[in-house]
Image (cartoon, grey):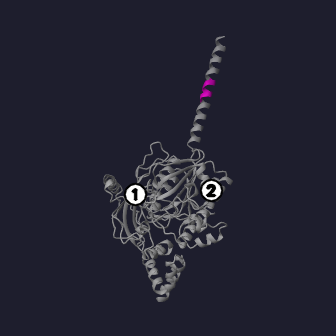
Amino acid sequence: MKIYTKHFIFIIALSLILTACEKSKSQTKEAIIEKKQPNIIWLMAEDMSTDLACYGLPNVKTPYLDKMATEGIRFDNAFVTNPICSPSRSAMIIGTHQVKTNTHHHRSNREVPLDKQFTPFTQKLREAGYTTILGNHAVMKKGRKIDVNFKHEALGEWDGESKFGLFDKYDTFEKADEPFFAQIQLAVTHRGDWWDQVRSESKHPVNPDTVEMPPYMADHPAIRLDWAKYLDQIEYMDNEVGMIFKELEDKGMADNTVVIFIGDNGRCNIRGKGYLHDPGLRIPLIVYYPEQFKGGEVRKDVVSATDITASILEFANIKIPEYMTGQPMFNENFNREYVYGARDLWDEIPEESRGITSDEWKYIRNDKPEIPFDAHQGYLEFYRPAVHVMRTLKKEGKLTKEQAFFFEDSKPVEELYNLINDPFELVNLADNPQYEGLLADLREKTIGFDNLMKPVSIIYNPKNMDQTIGLVKWIKTEHPEIQKQMEEGVEVGFKKWGKEYRNYLKNQK
C-alpha cells in the first residue's frame, strides 16, 4: 500500500512539474509574441502641410489617408524642427535636433562624417535584426530620396568612419525581409516639372474656382490654379499610399506592420516651406498599427518630428540612445510642451531664425531681420507662382495688410502668435504690452533651447549656388519673355531652363 502511495505521489508531482513547464513555455511564447518586432513603413510626403481631407481641408479627396486615420491615430500638433527638407530629414534620421548635430544648414557638410556620438537610427534597427529598405517600386521616382547633411551613402554598411551606408536594399519588401523598416519618399507633392502632367492626367482635377486659400494669399486666378495643382499632387500621392497598403495586404503583412505617414516639412508656398510660421513647421502625422491601437483616435499633444524617430525604435524594442532629443510618443512618460524650430542657410540665403511652438503659442526670433521673407531666392523664383503675382499686386497697392506682410523689406525682430485664436498667424502680438510677460517667458525658453542644442561642431561646407543665381540673372537679361511669364504666375520649368543655361555656359567656353 505504501508503495502504491509513493507511486501516486510521484505521479502527482511529475504532473505538477509538467504542468508548470507547459505554463512556463506558454508564458515564454506569449512574451515572445508580445515582443515580436513589427515591420515599420515610414511614408514621407514632401513639402506638405496638413492639407488632407481628414484634417478638414476642403476640395481635396484623400480616401486612403482618411481610412488610415480612421483606423489609426491622427496627430494634430506635430511639427518639424526645421521647415526645409535636408535639415529636417537630418534631425529625423538621427532622432536629434539638427542644430545640435551641426546638420542644420541646407545641403551642407555632405562630405563631413557625423560626430562619433551620433548614429543614424537605421543602423540601430539593423543591429536589432531589421532589414532596412529605401524606396518602393510603385511610387514616383521610386521614393529613394535621402537628402541629409552629413557624409552618407544610400546602401552599404555603416561604421561612421569609413563606411557610411544607411540602408540594406532598394524598393521591395518581402516576407524574407521581416522584420523590415522601409522609408518611402512620396515625391509628387514636391514642386517639380511634373505638376502640369499630373493635373492633365487626373480624372477629376481640382476646380480652381472652388478652392479655399489662406487669407494671407491673394485671390488671383494664377494663385488659385497653383493651389489646385498642389491638391492634384496630394490626390496622386494618396493613391500611392493606397497601392502600398494593397501590397501589404497581398503579401499578408498588413496586421504586423506599423505605417507612419508624415510630411518632411510644410507646403512650398507663401509662409510655408522655409519659414518658421505654421505652414512651414506643422505637418500631418498619422500612425497605423492595428495590433496595438484602436482606430479613430485624435491626439492634440505637441509632437516633434524627432519623437517619431524615437517611437520607431520603441516599436522595435530598441533602447532610446541618450543623445536623442526625441521621445517615444506612445510611452506613458511622453511629455513635450514645445517644439524648438530653427531656420538657417537655404541655398544662397544665410538666414538665422529660432522659435518655439506649443499647442497654443508660437514665438519666433529673427536674428537677421534685414533679410526679408521674400529674399528673391533663385530656387523660389521658379517654384512659387504666388510670389511673383503678389509682388505685382503689392506694387499696385492691391494686397491686404496681412498679405503684404510677407513682402515687406525686412522682418520683425520678434513674432508672437496665438495659434488657437489666430491659426493663420495674422496678428503679431510681440509689440502688444498686454503680452509683455508671456513674450519675455517664451524669449527665455527659446534661449534655453539655443543653449541646449548648441552645435557639436562649427564645420560648415555649404553647396555652391552660383549656377542657380546665374540662371535667374540670365533669364532676366537674355529671355525677358520668359521672365514676364514667371511674373504672371506661369511655372516655366526649372529643370528645362537650367539645362538651357548650362548649354549656354558650355558654348561660352
Residue 112: where, in percent of width, then height?
41, 66
Tag 2: amino acid? Tyr
Residue 395: where, in percent of width, then height?
42, 76
Question: Considering only order in the chain, which callout, 1 or 2, is on the residue closer to the N terminus?
Answer: 2
135 lies left or right of 401: right
The CA span between labels 2 and 1 is 33 Å
In depth, the one of 141 and 361 nearer the eye is 361
| Residue 348 highlighted magenta (yes or no) | no
Q: Which mark is residue 417?
A: 1
Residue 380: where, in percent of width, then height?
47, 73
214 lies left or right of 325: right
Q: Is residue 395 above or below residue 260?
A: below
Residue stretch in magenta = 14-20
Q: Is residue 164 above or below residue 301?
A: below
Q: Quadrant of the N terminus?
A: top right
364 lies left or right of 163: left
Q: Residue furthest top?
A: 1
Q: Is residue 8 above or below residue 476?
A: above
Crowd around label 2: few <14 · some 14–19 · many ≥20 (10 Å): some
Residue 11: where, in percent of width, then height?
65, 21
Q: Which residue is at 48% across, 55% downward?
A: 121
Circle 2 sits on which residue? 64
Asked whether the viewer can see residue 213, the reply is yes
Query: Is most of the magenta stretch helix, strand or loop?
Result: helix
In depth, the one of 132 and 439 nearer the eye is 439
